[in-house]
Image (tube, rainbow, N blue to C red):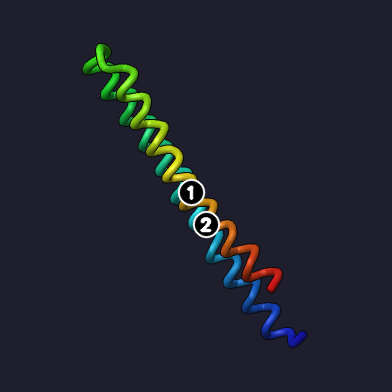
């Protein structure tokens, strides 16, 4: 394999990995907002927790898609 192609694959994989940083920040924002909402209105704890878990799952899905793209770039 050409050295330039390998180098560009590594750069592309590194740039695709940046999406994991956004996923980590998103999870922090979701649960931080959950704690703020829970402290303001503790009576709807179950509904808030459901929304927080949904937000967590969607945020992590975006991060996993970025990780999948990284692996596809590296190993294809």
Q: Secondary structure at mark 2?
A: helix
| Residue 19 percent coordinates (x, y) | 48, 56
Image side of residue 71 versus residue 58, left or right: right
> In the picture, which quadrant includes the N terminus?
bottom right
How dense is the environment of label 1, judged by Cα within 10 Å: few (below 14), some, or many (20 and up)? few
Q: In terms of depth relative to the viewer, which is nearer, 30 or 53? A: 53
Q: In terms of depth relative to the viewer, which is nearer, 49 or 28? A: 49
How dense is the environment of label 2, judged by Cα within 10 Å: few (below 14), some, or many (20 and up)? some
Image side of residue 21 versus residue 7, left or right: left
Rounded to the nearest angstrom, the CA distance separating label 2 from label 1 is 6 Å
Q: Which residue is mark 2?
A: 65
Q: In terms of depth relative to the viewer, which is nearer, 53 or 38? A: 53
| Residue 69 percent coordinates (x, y) | 57, 64
Q: Which residue is mark 1?
A: 61
Point out which mark residue 48 bears. Answer: none
Instruction: Check whether the beta carbons of the residues at disc 2 and disc 1 lie within 8 A of each other.
Output: yes
Name the residue: 22% across, 18% down: 40
Does 46 sit above or below residue 24?
above
């Amino acid at each position: 394999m050409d050295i330039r192609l390998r180098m560009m694959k590594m750069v592309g994989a590194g740039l695709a990995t940046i999406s994991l940083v956004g996923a980590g920040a998103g999870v922090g924002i979701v649960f931080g907002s959950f704690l703020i909402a829970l402290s303001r209105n503790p009576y709807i704890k179950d509904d808030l927790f459901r929304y927080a878990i949904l937000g967590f799952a969607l945020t992590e899905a975006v991060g996993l898609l970025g990780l999948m793209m990284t692996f596809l770039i590296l190993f294809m």
